[in-house]
Image (cartoon, rainbow, N blue to C red):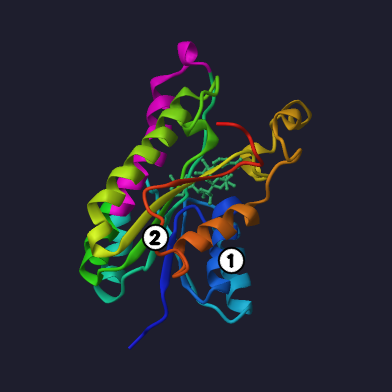
């Protein structure tokens, strides 16, 4: 019988998701790694994990598509249940609301918020049966405070915080802990075109964070060391006041 814990991480081909996958693999998790189309990035994450003696299964699908989520996961879930689900996949389509197309609004909501539903509703019934588990939703500073040009993204990320708090209440009796992590400015592809010099003065620690700094907080939330923290938002943002 397999006893190794499994972590299912969405959007794990690069950036924060990749760092979470590598950190959890270090903690002896078997990794189920979802991504959209970045096969090379996902393969590289898998290679690093396997070269270090770990195990990583690649699961390419679009988190905003419930049918794809179910099709990719249902046969695996009949055999094994992830202990940890990390809803991380995301992207942004910034622009002021007055000029925002319906497509940019809907796509961002679909990936972040419906993606949370699609993954969590698929995996949760199995976690409930096991009476144990950890769910971590990657929100954002944008979900905690107002950021012009990100109404769609802020709405999705704030929605994730509400979903985190309510789901934590629903599943606490089954020993499933649900938390959110809200990164500030983290050095990834998503932030590479931002005007860094203009942003740095607003960050008390004076620098962008690294994906690894977010991953370590996620790993703590998923660990047995976290036994009494649920329904919370941990802001990993270098001190930006939210
Ligand atoms: P990234 O662009 O480096 O990586 C995004 C990952 O999500 C990739 O693996 C991509 O394949 C995957 N993805 C995108 N759309 C998907 C879909 N529909 N289905 C499946 N996978 C999909 O981004 P990142 O900076 O690492 O961001 C990761 C998460 O952290 C996102 O939810 C983002 O909103 C959040 N976040 C990032 C920052 C930051 O400063 N980088 C700050 C706050 C929150």
Give SS at disc 2: loop
The residue located at (24%, 66%) in the rendering is: 126
The residue located at (25%, 56%) in the rendering is: 171
User: x, y percentage for residue 125?
Assistant: 21, 61
Per the image, is 223 magenta? no
Residue lying furthest right:
197
Q: Which residue is mark 1?
A: 22
Magenta-tinted stretch = 96-120
Main SS of the magenta part reads helix
Name the one closer to the observer, 232 or 23: 232
In which quadrant is the C terminus drawn? top right
Query: Would residue 66 be seen by someone viewing this image from the given angle?
Result: no
Q: Which mark is residue 228?
A: 2
Say if 110 sits above or below 24 in the image: above
Q: Mark 2 and mark 1: span between their CA atoms?
A: 25 Å
User: x, y percentage for residue 193?
Assistant: 69, 33
The residue located at (60%, 32%) in the rendering is: 241
């Amino acid at each position: 019988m397999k006893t190794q814990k499994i972590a299912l991480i969405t959007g794990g081909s690069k950036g924060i998701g990749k760092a979470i996958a590598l950190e959890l693999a270090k903690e002896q998790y078997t990794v189920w790694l979802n991504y959209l189309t970045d096969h090379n990035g996902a393969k590289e994450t898998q290679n690093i994990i396997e070269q270090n003696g770990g195990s990583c299964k690649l699961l390419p699908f679009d988190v905003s598509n419930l049918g794809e989520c179910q099709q990719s996961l249902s046969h695996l879930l009949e055999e094994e249940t992830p202990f940890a689900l990390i809803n991380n996949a995301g992207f942004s389509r910034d622009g002021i609301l007055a000029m925002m197309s319906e497509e940019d609004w809907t796509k961002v909501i679909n990936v972040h918020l419906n993606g949370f539903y699609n993954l969590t509703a698929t995996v949760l019934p199995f976690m409930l049966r096991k009476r144990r588990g950890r769910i971590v939703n990657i929100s954002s500073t944008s979900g905690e405070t107002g950021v012009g040009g990100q109404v769609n993204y802020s709405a999705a990320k704030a929605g994730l915080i509400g979903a985190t708090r309510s789901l934590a209440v629903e599943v606490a009796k089954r020993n499933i802990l649900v938390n959110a992590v809200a990164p500030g400015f983290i050095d990834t592809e998503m932030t590479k075109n931002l005007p860094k010099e203009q942003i740095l003065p607003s960050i008390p620690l004076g620098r962008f964070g690294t994906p690894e700094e977010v991953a370590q907080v996620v790993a703590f939330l998923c660990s047995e060391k976290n036994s009494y923290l649920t329904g919370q938002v941990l802001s990993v943002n270098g001190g930006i006041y939210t």
